Image (cartoon, grey):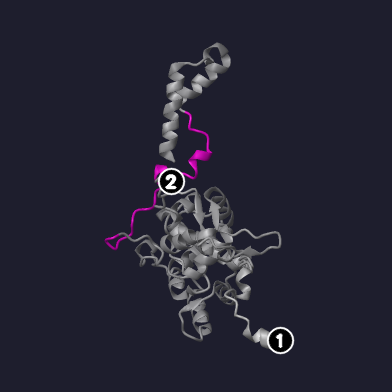
Amino acid sequence: MIEVQNLEEVEEEAEPSDYEEDAFEAEAPPEKVYAAPVPLADVKAHFTELGAILQVKQIKKGDALKYILHGLRDPETSKKIKKVTLETLERQFVDRIGFAKEVSSKLSKFLIETPNEEGKILQMDSGGPTGQTHGQAVIARRKDLQGKLLSNIRDYTLYNGLAITSMLSRLQSLFEDHRTELLTELEDADYDELGTAPLEDIWKAMKLVGLYPDSLDEELRDFLVFLMMRHSKALSAVAYADFCKTFEEDYNLLEDKKSIWENIGEDGEPAQPYEPSSDEGELESDKEPPKFPEEETQDANQQQSPARSGGNVEDLEQNELLEKVDEILM
């Protein structure tokens, strides 16, 4: 007679499986994370600050990106980099301009990050197993970065001694009867005794004492912002005592203490104004090779006499020379 075991006993005696239930499930891809882009309103004041700082450093607007990226080279080719990562630009804003990390991060994200169709920024370190951080993965072409940077920096003038003397003379005559009252107004409003005031509060204080910044021409307003930034970390924290000092009759900017943004050399003295080297031109490879007068003459002759354009050896050698020059300039 065959004994039939109870089904429950059979289940108890069954050997446990060597495989986990989830062993055959595919590994879930990392969840994508999105963030809002940095709006212009959050960095507009920082671009104004950047323009004033570049004025102090005596950097032409067109050379702004060259100055910020100065010294960076492609490790493989030793040529200037053609693509800039978010991480690199953040670091350069700190090292070359002197911005705080938070400000550098905002500016860099605004300039480099590109929103998707829904207006969001994919955080690249969540986009897959690339081994890169978001700052390393997000890249912009240098040419595109140049255009966006310059479009957000106001046009400005580099002041020489004569221009500074002229502008100060105009301002001192305007502020002569209001300077002391303006300083008192700002001190009274400084409840925490920080010695600083936001730019907006300075404009308001000027109106209260009978000065109307809105009525000043753009040239004078820009010069006022330049004076404010010389000894201030930001336009949200202007060192108002140093600012008001500039309206004293015997004030001389050239004899004033050094700006906190000024280029300082190894000896502690102001460094020579920055001059971009010949190999720092913006993507020279994207431009047409420079033409020498002799080449222009040959082009004109070739157009007049088609028979001359047939493979002249000297023309070939000159073209090869120009290509080498172009490579060196890159």
Front-most of residues 149 and 316? 316
Residue positioned most to the left: 267
Residue 8: x percent and y percent? 70, 88
Front-most of residues 122 and 61? 122
Q: Nearer the viewer, mark 2 or mark 1?
A: 1
**As drawn, 218 above or below 27:** above
* Residue range highlighted in magenta: 266-291
Disc 2 target residue: 280
Residue 190: x percent and y percent? 51, 83
Q: How far is disc 2 from disc 1 in space, using C-alphas? A: 93 Å
The crowding category of the residue bearing disc 1, from other C-alpha atoms within 10 Å (few below 14, some 14 to 19, many at least 20), is: few
The answer to whether residue 170 is visible is no
Callout 1, which amino acid?
Glu
Residue 175: x percent and y percent? 51, 69
On whether residue 278 falls in the magenta region, the answer is yes
**As drawn, 318 above or below 143:** above
SS state under label 1? loop
Residue under the image location 47 percent in, 50 percent down = 63
| Res 253 → quadrant | bottom left
Q: Quadrant of the N terminus?
A: bottom right
Q: Quadrant of the C terminus?
A: top left
Counting residues from the start of the chain, the first of labels 2 and 1 encountered is: 1
User: Magenta region's main secondary structure?
Assistant: loop
Front-most of residues 3 and 207? 3
Disc 1 target residue: 3
SS state under label 2? helix
Residue under the image location 66 percent in, 64 percent down = 120
Residue under the image location 41 percent in, 64 percent down = 261
Residue under the image location 51 percent in, 86 percent down = 191
The crowding category of the residue bearing disc 2, from other C-alpha atoms within 10 Å (few below 14, some 14 to 19, many at least 20), is: many
**As drawn, 69 above or below 16:** above
Callout 2, which amino acid?
Glu
